[in-house]
Image (cartoon, rainbow, N blue to C red):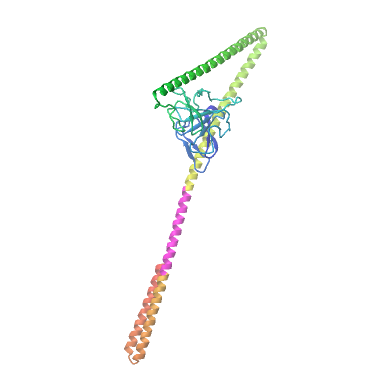
Amino acid sequence: MLADIIKIHCLVHHANFPMPRTSRAVVCRESAHAHTLSSNFPYDGLWVYCCNCQTFLAWDKGQTGVSIKECPFCLSSLNPRVYTCDRCAVTMVDFDDQTLRKHHAVLEWGAPQPACAGCHQFPHATPKKHFCPAMQCEISTARAECSFCGIATETNSLPPSQTITAKLDAALAEAEAKALEAEERRRLAEEAVRNEVKLRIQAEHKVEEIEKRATRELNQAKASNFESEMARREADAAKALAEAEAKARAEAERLAQAAELQRQDAERRKTEAEAKAREVEERHRQAEATVRREAKMRAQAEQQAREVAEQFSSQLADSEKKAEAIAKGVKKDRVAIALTTAIAVTLTIALIILIVTLILHLR
């Protein structure tokens, strides 16, 4: 089960998290807002795989402060060898460290060993090396152009003499690569032969031990029967232990899936709560705006009422002055005085009615 889990490193948040290899979507949830690193791993995005720490790095060509010549996770930097796969979006970088047991490596002439760490496929052609100005290092790839700098790995616009020389150099490089590959295969074959001889010797030793054991069993039948019974019991116990481990592993996987579902449900609830909080805040803001508008309208109405009252007071004062003038000028003209008084009373009643109407409107 551990072979199906890969390690992911997000350079944005400097966070590490595991992921099943069969999962295509890679999402970093180390911040308040999760962001997608790849929707079709390993064929989408730009990935760098460190062979020393066996970690996939979500690479960004525009990011500063990091270099492919030094792993930002394990800080390996001795003799970097870089290979870009032409079938997926993974770039493998390998550093010298004889103490590590690596699952994948990059050979000196640029080929992946045993295959690409992302898609597990071989290159469709012999990888060619070129110096990448963007990464400031030598990269081997079978792509037509570099994934980082965009420079074509093969130049077709040379003069005929240079074209022939380039073809000869390419053929020589390819022959050297094939020779190195053959040498590597010969070394692997010799190592396989040595391992086979070693296994054969071990098998012969085991056969001798089995023959000696059989002889002892023939000489001591009772002891042999007892040992057989003990071996059967030990086998039964080992089988029961293996079944218990399998059940425990299945239970652990079930608990992990349940925890993942609970985490997803918690994130969904958190998102809903944040949406409701934003909605309540928007309603509160609208209510405050409504209250401010009503207060402004009430202040305007009170201002209008004061202006009408002042205007009416001034008109009433003018009417009283006119009535006094008329009373002084014509003391005996009672009809004029009564008319002036009626006008004043009428204006007073109109003012009272206007003030009551404004108060009722404000309520």
Residue 342 to residue 135: above or below:
below
Is 321 displayed left or right of 16 in the figure? left
Residue in view at x 39 percent, y 82 percent: 317
Camera-nearest residue between 261 and 330: 330
Could you tell me what secondary structure mostly forms the magenta stretch?
helix
Residue at the far bottom: name it.
332
Percent x, y for residue 3?
Answer: 53, 27
Please identify the quarter of the rendering in which residue 234 is found.
top right
Give the magenta range: 275-301
Is 139 displayed left or right of 244 in the figure? left
Q: Is residue 363 visible?
A: no
Q: Is residue 297 magenta?
A: yes
Q: Is residue 350 visible?
A: yes
Percent x, y for residue 352?
Answer: 39, 76
Q: Is residue 69 magenta?
A: no
Specify the quadrant that holds the N terminus. top right
Specify the quadrant that holds the C terminus. bottom left
